[in-house]
Image (cartoon, rainbow, N blue to C red):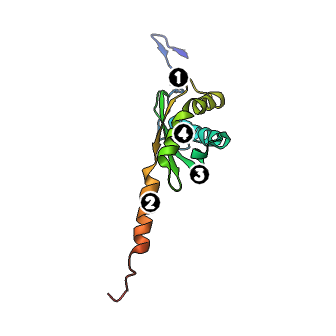
Amino acid sequence: MAITTPTTTVVRMAKRRRTGRRRPDELGRYPRVARVNELCREIVADELERIDDDRLVMVTITHVDVVRDLSHATVDFSRLGQGEEAAAEALAEHRVRLQGAIARQARLRRTPELAFRLDRAIVAGARIEELLRDRPASHPDD
């Protein structure tokens, strides 16, 4: 908008709002990488149900961590009972199929290459629970 005065012309520029970048601390926003992590976790878990492999029985996908450029993703899994190594081998064998499911179902620039790792938090939590259960009860008057 231009305002003309007898001696000078003053140009007022409207303040431009940035629409492309958002601050991570804005309320109500859910970061893109976190959304991609959850989407990939759901897709991999759904696809595991369709795979007929006895080594993948009772396998749970606990978390997926996708790097920001979408080139790699680490899939954390747990398995009730024994056979975590066999489950890891089976997941590695079916990696291409799982990546293909992500490519088909997610709208991403690139499909991350999957790597699998056993979620030690579940095992550690079970161990702590076992230790607490076996601990002798303390009396309030001690």
SS at badge 1: loop
For discs 3 and 2, the disc positioned in front in the rendered view: 3
**How far apart in space, not on screen, are marks 4 and 1 (Cα)?**
59 Å
Label ID, residue 14: 1
Frontmost residue, 21 versus 106: 106
| Sequence-wise first label, 3 or 1 | 1
Q: Position of residue 109 (x, y in %)?
A: 56, 23
Q: Check disc 4 and report the residue beneath it.
A: 90
**How far apart in space, not on screen, are marks 3 and 1 (Cα)?**
59 Å
Q: Looking at the image, is 7 positioned above or below residue 126?
A: above
**How far apart in space, not on screen, are marks 3 and 4 (Cα)?**
13 Å
For discs 3 and 1, the disc positioned in front in the rendered view: 3
**How far apart in space, not on screen, are marks 2 and 4 (Cα)?**
25 Å
Q: Looking at the image, is 1 positioned above or below residue 137?
A: above
Identify the amino acid type marked 3: Met
Residue drawn at (52%, 44%) of the image: 87
Q: Looking at the image, is 86 positioned above or below residue 138?
A: above
| Sequence-wise first label, 2 or 1 | 1
Identify the amino acid type marked 1: Ala
Residue drawn at (50%, 44%) of the image: 86
Q: Is residue 31 visible?
A: no
Label ID, residue 125: 2
Label ID, residue 85: none
Q: Position of residue 64 (x, y in %)?
A: 51, 40
